[in-house]
Amino acid sequence: MEFLETYNLVGLLIGISTFLIIGFFHPIVIKSEYYLGTRCWWIFLLLGIVGVIAALIVREVLWSSLLGVFAFSSFWTILEVFEQKERVQKGWFPMNPKRKHEYENK
C-alpha cells in the first residue's frame, strides 16, 4: 500500500477496480434474470446494504472506495435485472424456457 501511495497510484487502482467490478456485474445481471427472474432483486439490495455498511466501517481509503463501488453496483443491478427482463421480452437475449410463463403479457 505504501508503494501505491508513494507513486500516487491509488486513484488509478480504484479506477481500474471500478471498471472490473462494473464489468463483473454485467454477466451476473444476465444470468440472474435468466435463472431466477426478477425475484432476485432483494439479494442485490442486501449486498448493497452490506457493502455500504462495510465501506463506512473500513478506514483504508482504497478498500472503503472499492466497497462503496461494490455496494452501489449492487444497487444498480436491481434496476438492471428488471430492464434485462424487458430486453428478453424484446428478443435481445435468450428466454429461459422453464420460466416462459413469466414473460407473457397479462
Image: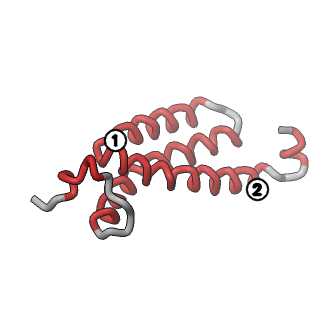
Judge from the rendering whether residue 66 lies leftward or rightward of residue 77; answer left or right. Answer: right
Please state which of the two labelled residues, at mark 1 or mark 2, is closer to the viewer: 1
Residue drawn at x 37%, y 60% is 94
Q: 68 or 34, which lies in front?
A: 34
Residue found at x 29% / y 70%? 90
Helix, strand or loop at disc 1?
A: helix
Which residue is identified by label 1?
Answer: 40
Q: In the displayed structure, does residue 57 sit left or right of residue 39? A: right
Q: SS at mark 2? A: helix
Residue nearest the observer in this picture, 74 or 25: 25
What residue is pinned by disc 2? 12
Q: Tell me where residue 43 sits by quadrant.
A: top left
Q: Give x and y (percent) for residue 22.
A: 56, 54
Query: Of the residues under marks 1 and 2, which one precedes in the sequence?
Result: 2
Q: Whole-percent x and y of residue 8?
A: 84, 52
For mark 2, does the 10 Å Cα neighbourhood hold few (<14), some (14 to 19), or many (20 or more) residues?
few
Image quadrant containing the C terminus: bottom left
Residue occupying image coordinates x 50% and y 43%: 71
Quadrant where the N terminus is found in the figure: top right
Q: Which amino acid type is shown beneath numbered disc 2?
A: Leu
Which quadrant would residue 83 be assigned to in this image? bottom left
